[in-house]
Amino acid sequence: MEKTRRTFLKTASGIAAAGAAFATPDLVLAAADEKPAASGSGGGLTEHKLPDLPYPYEALEPTIDAETMKLHHDKHHAAYVTNLIKAEKALADARAANDFAMVQHWSKSAAFNGGGHALHSLFWTIMAPAGKGGGGEPTGALLDKINADFGSFAAFKGQFSAAAKAVEGSGWALLHHRVTDHRLIILQAENQHKLGTWDTVPIMGIDVWEHAYYLTYRNDRAKYVDAWWNIVNWEQVGKNLAAHMPK
Ligand code: MN3
């Protein structure tokens, strides 16, 4: 799957891909220890795994409470992993049986749950305890890129916050690196997977599903979004950007 996506991105890059500077990115979305299973063991399917949180459940308090983190990681994210595995297995079984009556159902499930697994795997890592890796402002190459593509950090923050607050229903605000021209762009995502442009890779994002904030903030999503900046791990976001920029 990853190879297919890389191939697509390289092809979609057109002129950019023809330039010597273009380098295919190393995807940093999914848990680092996920590897395709060896052929013959489980049909060659990837053994998706729930990654550990990089900090204790209570580490992000008071911005995000420990109970929310425990439920969000142990129940919600875990369910996306379980259901992604289930969907990919069902598609493999359908291929083997040449029975594609349910391909629409399982394809949609693979997109929804695969999106959920990828975005949550990213989400945990781009947060850190306030004042201990979280909060403040970006520096270095990341700040330079934000200034170049959005005008200023304040302008970027304003657009990103507005995007997060305005997501219709459940979804995300995401900062993407666009592979075709190496610009940073902000997109909303509905659910876990809709409204993408497909030539981009998210390097930062905020989950604005109610399960991400309701225990502390109730229905006040805007208050959650405004508080969330205190726990953004800019060092990791900078690393994610660096991983995708031309070497
Ligand atoms: Mn979530």
Image: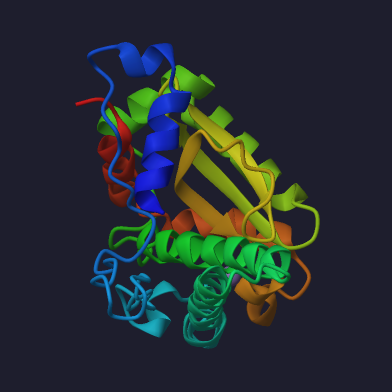
Q: Which of the 4 quarters of the picture holds residue 126?
A: bottom left
Could you say where residue 51 lies in the image, as x and y percent from the top left? 34, 75
Going by the image, does 26 lie left or right of 209?
left
Q: Position of residue 159 (x, y in %)?
A: 63, 35
The C terminus is located in which quarter?
top left
In the depicted view, which residue is nearer to us: 106 or 185? 106
Residue at 67% x, 67% y is: 100
Depicted 200 relative to depicted 88: above or below: above
> Left or right: 121 with respect to 83?
left
Please, is residue 16 above or below residue 107 in the view? above
Residue 10 x %, y %: 38, 29
Q: Image quadrant of ligand 1?
A: bottom right
Q: Quadrant of residue 99?
A: bottom right
Taking the image as shown, residue 51 lies to the left or right of residue 74, namely left
Which residue occupies the extreme left position in the image? 247
Residue drawn 30% across and 51% down?
Answer: 236
Please identify the quarter of the rendering in which residue 31 is found. Answer: bottom left
Q: Quadrant of the N terminus?
A: bottom left
Q: Is residue 137 visible?
A: no
Q: Is residue 165 above or below residue 14?
A: below
Please, is residue 162 above or below residue 221 in the view? above
Colour scheme of the picture? rainbow
Which residue: 24% across, 17% down? 21
Nearer to the camera, 235 or 62: 235
Q: Nearer the viewer, residue 224 or 30?
A: 30
The residue most toward the front is 98
Task: Give me the residue at 62% from left, 39% from top.
Answer: 187
Instruction: Choose between 62 and 105: the one closer to the eye.
Output: 105
Residue 86 visible, this orientation: yes
Give residue 225's position: percent from left, percent from top: 62, 56
Number of marks drawn: 0
